[in-house]
Amino acid sequence: MQMEITHDMLERAARQVVEITAGLAVRGATRHSRGDDASAELVGTLCFLGTFGGTLVVQCTWQRATAIAAAMLASSETPADDTIRDAMGEVVNQIGGVIKRAVAAGVNEMLLSPPVVASGSPLTHRVQSSATPICVDLDLDGGPLGIRLWPETRTFR
Amino acid sequence: MSTVLTIDDSKVVRTMVARHLQPYGCTVVEAQNGLEGLEAARQHHPDLILLDVTMPVMDGRQCLAELRKDEVCRTIPVVMLTAESGRDLVVELAKLGVSGYIVKPFEAATFDKEVVKVLGAAREASAGPATPAATAASAPDPTAVLVVDDSERVLEAARAALTGSMKVLTALGGQAAIAEYRSARPAYVVVDLAMPDMDGFATLAALQPLGESNFVALALRGDTAAHERAKKAGFRAVVEKPFQGAELLERLRALGASSGDPVQAHVEEHAGCSVVRLPEPGTESKVAPLLVKKLRALAEDGTDKVIVDLAALADITGDQITTLARLLETAATLGIRTAICAADAGIVGRLQQVAETKSAPCAATRDEAASRLA
């Protein structure tokens, strides 16, 4: 059985998490394959392990991350820095979970690593992979949320 | 006042959960990993534990295993709240014993449904020897059905089909249904999906938090998209319009509508086979042991063929799969041959993924299942 990761799958997963968990409206999305593009201020990463492997990266500005965290908490107050990183980790984790369900459904087991979140201003990150990344930028009020996936293999049996 | 323990390494998630629990007036206790969760469970004896899987120090799998070994905590209901949902994990957790599974990201309605299922039972248990009035107020009436449609003609057809077998209440539209439901608390609610102003989905969302009833959707014939939406929203079954009266009654019977005996409602005969239906979600702990006992009685009476009928299910829960596996295992030890009747492709697919159920012959109708056992 072959299962290909697509931009459509990645965008659906990201939209689902942003719209349900954070309650934010996604105004649009841009799809591309430029994985090592602009630097970000907050980067969340997790790995897929198993028959399908890969690296998932979610990135955005600190301001964007702050707004997402506040939305998840349904709070008008600015969350603490640790809370913002926590929220980003949860977003990465949930996007990873949705992708895992789509990819691994009824076929093979797949593991998610715990998410790792790094912050700095600005950060430049790079994933060592020969694969072409699948990239989606969600257009949210106040700035984009970038989602990148580097698959280790695009098909599995 | 109920106590809920939320175990998750994310403070953001714990805060979101506490917010979702506010309407229930619960005391919320938090723990950031499985080890802290175990200690908190022993200290606070919560009515419900919401448990994540991926956590440092002690993950949710190990925490659940330890809870089930603990003399004090083993019976505390646990609902998993996690982004992880691999089939092996789900089966493993189901075997350890979970009362529900909420996958992140989760809608508020899904969260509410799982929580009400457990906290509602906890409230009834903690009330002690209930007065008949208190019991009547809290438990749905298993002999009553509320039919909700914007067409008087459909309501009349439903009355004609069901009166005599059940107490039939009707409501012209979703808004009227709320008042009718509150006064009668029927165990079964049949809802037209396509109604103006307040459609079937909005009606379901309004009624579900009010009590533990079985919801059946009325959908247009051939509208597969509506069928899928209904299943995902939480309807237990879908009946197509226009419906035959006998069909509607049969679907409600399949949900255990017409009998007070918790076991008899799940067992009947068909084409020389005994047919067993699984307990409704949330009743497994009470009904499943009785079904196992019933299998033994059937074996003693000479029954050697049993069909487990899943045709009325819109979805199958982890607990129901565990019950099914237990029934199949018991039947095998008693020398009873079994077949599964399931038409839903999603359910069939899930059964194929579980070691204990994938080898049982599966057929789309009872007649086909009976012929497989002939």
Image (cartoon, coloured by chain):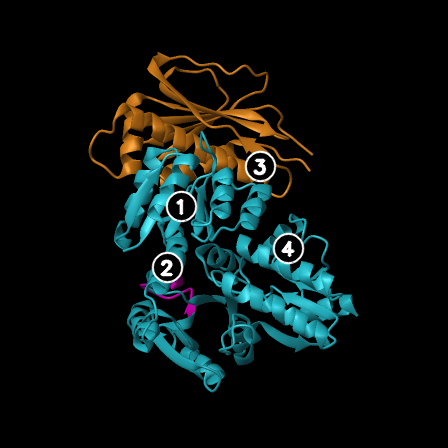
Chain colours: A orange, B cyan
Mark 2 and mark 4 lie on one chain; the one further toward the N terminus is 2
**Quadrant containing the N terminus of chain A in the rendered view:** top right
Instruction: Please name the residue that numbered disc 2 is placed on.
Output: B122
Asked whether the beta carbons under mark 1 and mark 2 sit within 8 Å of each other, the answer is no
Q: Residue A20: image x %, image y %?
A: 37, 42
Does the magenta run of residues contain B249?
Answer: no
Q: Residue B263: image x %, image y %?
A: 56, 73
Is residue B149 visible to us here? no
From the viewer's perspective, is the residue at label 3 or at label 1 nearer? 1
Pointer 3 indicates a residue of which chain?
A
- The stretch of residues the image draws in magenta is B190-202
The answer to whether A4 appears left or right of B338 in the picture is left
Out of A128 and B287, give the one closest to the viewer: B287
Q: Amino acid at mark 4?
A: Val
Pointer 4 indicates a residue of which chain?
B
Q: Residue B284: image x %, image y %?
A: 52, 62
10 Å neighbourhood of mark 1: few (<14), some, or many (≥20)? many
Do pointers 2 and 4 mark residues of a single chain? yes
Out of B242 and B293, give the one closest to the viewer: B293
Q: CA distance from mark 3 to mark 2?
A: 37 Å
Instruction: Please name the residue that numbered disc 4 is placed on.
Output: B348
Out of B255 and B284, give the one closest to the viewer: B284
Q: Secondary structure at mark 1?
A: strand
| Furthest residue in direction front, as rendered | B71
Q: CA distance from mark 3 to mark 1?
A: 26 Å
Out of B10 and A12, give the one closest to the viewer: B10
Q: CA distance from mark 3 to mark 4?
A: 19 Å
Instruction: Please name the residue that numbered disc 3 is placed on.
Output: A103
What residue do we see at 73% from left, 59% from top? B361
Q: Secondary structure at mark 3?
A: helix
Q: Amino acid at mark 2?
A: Ala
Instruction: Please name the residue that numbered disc 1 is placed on.
Output: B50
